Image (tube, rainbow, N blue to C red):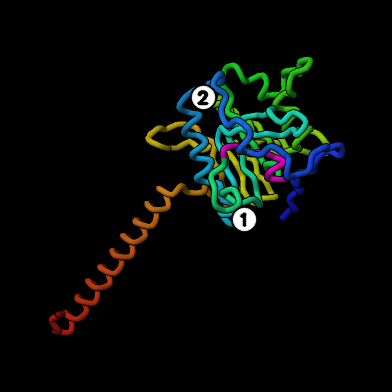
Amino acid sequence: MLPIRSNKWIPPADLPLSKAQLPTMYDLPSEDPEEPGWPDDFHYYQPQLLRETFCPPDYPPEQIYIATDLNLYYDLHHSTWYKRPDWFAVLGVPRFYEGRELRYSYVIWQEEVAPFLVVELLSEGTESEDLGQTMREVKQPPTKWQVYEQILQIPYYIIFSRISNELQVFHWQAGHYQALPPQADRVWLPEIQLGIGLWLGNYQGLERQWLRWYDGQLQWLPTPVEREQQRTQQEHQRAEQEHQRAEQLAAQLRALGIEPK
């Protein structure tokens, strides 16, 4: 297994404030009333499926933080600047802040660990920025691509279009994102022993192409509902096998002239 590059956040050298003076998630806004929420149902269901199937084997669930459409604050010198990924995962931090509290937002200088990967679901109005095709305007915050690649250096940036069913995966290497071409609509992430790919199946009652995680045996990781269905099916099979064994034993006893009780 390849080592995971540290995403430990390093404060700027010219940081004028002590850590106790820094704004935290309690001070920074978690919502922008002028910014629309999820643009469609897909932005609701797809992140759920990603969350339910993201199970890196070397990390306990309580040390994985997953967020959907949450403000990600990244620049202490401009503490109100943020990006809002459709989905992101951070490894090695508590699922709940300090182990006991739900987060209002994810503040890099408070958490001190950057996300390991982000997922953007393309939609009209944000496609150009998601794909890194926009330029930073004067006196405006950096683009999403610049934040992910240059400021936070997030190891994996994943983009999916539900219109074209196109999966794009970018890996941070030597200061820049390098595209990882999917093989059979799948891309393996060796650092976490998981892969991500396109799965054609029924989720929440809708049959379509979904973005989903798979394991080292190329098996799609099950959702909690699927795990329960598998458990129920296995119990049914065991009960059926026990019934068949009992019937066979009864038949053998009758052949010997013994009436089974």
Q: Earlier in the sequence, mark 1 or mark 2?
A: 2
Q: Does residue 18 lie above or below 84 as drawn?
A: below
Taking the magenta stretch, the answer to whether it contains residue 110 is yes
User: SS of the residue at dot 1?
Assistant: loop
**Which residue is pictured at 83% across the width and 37% down the height?**
16
Please tell me the numbered disc located at residue 37.
Answer: 2
Residue 2 visible at all:
yes
Residue occupying the point 48% across, 28% down? 42
Residue closer to the observer: 150 or 182: 150
- Outermost residue, right direction? 13
Up the image or down, 229 lies above or below 146; here it is below
Question: How many residues crowd mark 2 within 10 Å: few (<14), some (14–19), many (20+)?
Answer: few
Q: Quadrant of residue 152?
A: top right
Residue 215 appears anywhere in the view: no
Please state if 54 lies on the left or on the right of 12 as rendered: left
Q: Which mark is residue 59?
A: 1
Closer to the camera in the image, 180 or 49: 49
Amino acid beneath label 1: Tyr
Residue 109, percent from left and from top: 72, 41
Q: Mark 1 or mark 2: which is in front?
A: 2
Classify residue 157 by image quadrant. Answer: top right
| Picture layout, residue 247 above or below residue 101 | below
Q: Residue at x 28, y 63 (%)?
A: 240
Point out residue 154 in the picture as x, y percentages from the top left corner. 72, 38
